[in-house]
């Protein structure tokens, strides 16, 4: 065989081999990609996790609102609180009139704090007493007696009375600090037509 022909045969074999390799390469690459894709698909496949048991919520305290803040529970108001404030103002005014010591102040005390029934019985008698006092020398112990009497009303401001069921009667324990008598006695204030009066015994004494 001639050398020239031998070289041509070798070149032909190389070309044919390259062509076969070229056409065979895509068929081998596709399965590799498919395998790679399948491998990647497995790596991204979601994992199923068994659900965990959720503990039930803790019971909410009775004084806690839905938003989680505690409700402001106010103390029940005393139904007689307003009446006690009214009485305290009256007691302070009583003490003021007594300390003034004048005849007109004493008359105002009677007209303001004696019930109409008692006032009708006592007013004339009290007026006669005041007229007699005006003609007599002043009692040197008069201011002291008035101050002790006034203090007996001031003492009631800090005291908690006992009210009746409808709140129109209030009973106190009053200590009379005058005329040498310091024994406690029961005092009842009664509300008539919206005004507080001293509730004297029916005899008017």
Image: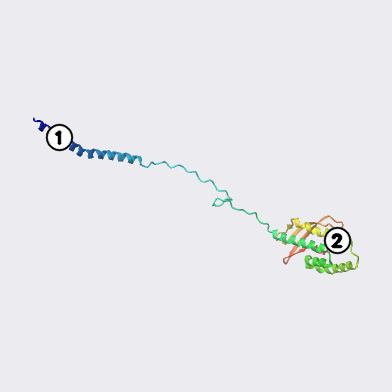
The location of residue 128, given as percent across then percent down, is 87, 69
Foreground mark, 2 or 1?
1
Q: Looking at the picture, how far across and down is residue 80, in whole percent?
A: 70, 59
Residue lying at 32% horizontally and 39% vertically, measured from the top left? 39
Residue 113 percent across, percent down from the top left: 78, 65
Residue at the farthest front position: 4
* Residue 32, above or below 157: above
- Residue marked by disc 1: 11
Which mark is drawn over residue 79? none
Binning the other alpha carbons within 10 Å of mark 1 as few (below 14), some (14 to 19) or many (20 upward) gives: few
Q: Where residue 44 sits: x, y (%)?
A: 35, 41
Number of other residues with Cα within 10 Å of mark 2, as a class: few under 14, some 14 to 19, many 20 or more: some
Q: Quadrant of the C terminus?
A: bottom right
Position of residue 101 in the picture relative to residue 89 (left or right): right
Horizontal placement of 79 versus 122: left or right?
left
Question: Which residue is identified by label 2?
Answer: 143
Q: Nearer the viewer, residue 140 or 203?
A: 140
Report the quarter where the N terminus lies. Answer: top left
Distance from disc 2 to disc 1, alpha carbons, whole Å, reads: 151 Å
Seen as rendered, the residue at the extreme top is 1
SS class, disc 2: helix
Quarter of the figure with residue 136: bottom right
Q: How is the image coloured?
A: rainbow
Q: Quadrant of residue 141?
A: bottom right
Can residue 80 be seen in the rendering of this structure?
no
**What's the residue at 28%, 40% (across, down)?**
33
């Amino acid at each position: 065989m001639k050398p020239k022909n031998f070289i041509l045969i070798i070149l032909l074999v190389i070309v044919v081999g390259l062509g076969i390799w070229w056409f065979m390469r895509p068929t081998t690459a596709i399965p590799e990609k498919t395998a790679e894709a399948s491998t990647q698909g497995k790596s991204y496949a979601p994992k199923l996790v068994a659900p965990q048991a959720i503990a039930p919520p803790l019971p909410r305290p009775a004084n806690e609102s839905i938003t989680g803040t505690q409700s402001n529970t106010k103390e029940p108001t005393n139904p007689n609180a307003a009446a006690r404030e009214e009485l305290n103002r009256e007691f302070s005014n009583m003490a003021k009139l007594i300390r003034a010591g004048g005849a007109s102040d004493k008359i105002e005390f009677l007209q303001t704090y004696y019930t109409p029934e008692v006032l009708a019985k006592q007013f004339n008698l009290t007026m006669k007493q005041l007229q007699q006092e005006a003609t007599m020398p002043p009692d040197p112990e008069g201011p002291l007696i008035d101050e002790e009497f006034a203090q007996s009303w001031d003492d009631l401001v800090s005291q908690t009375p006992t009210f009746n069921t409808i709140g129109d009667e209030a009973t106190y324990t009053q200590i009379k600090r005058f005329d040498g008598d310091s024994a406690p006695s029961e005092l009842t204030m009664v509300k008539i037509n919206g005004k507080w009066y001293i509730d004297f015994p029916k005899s008017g004494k």
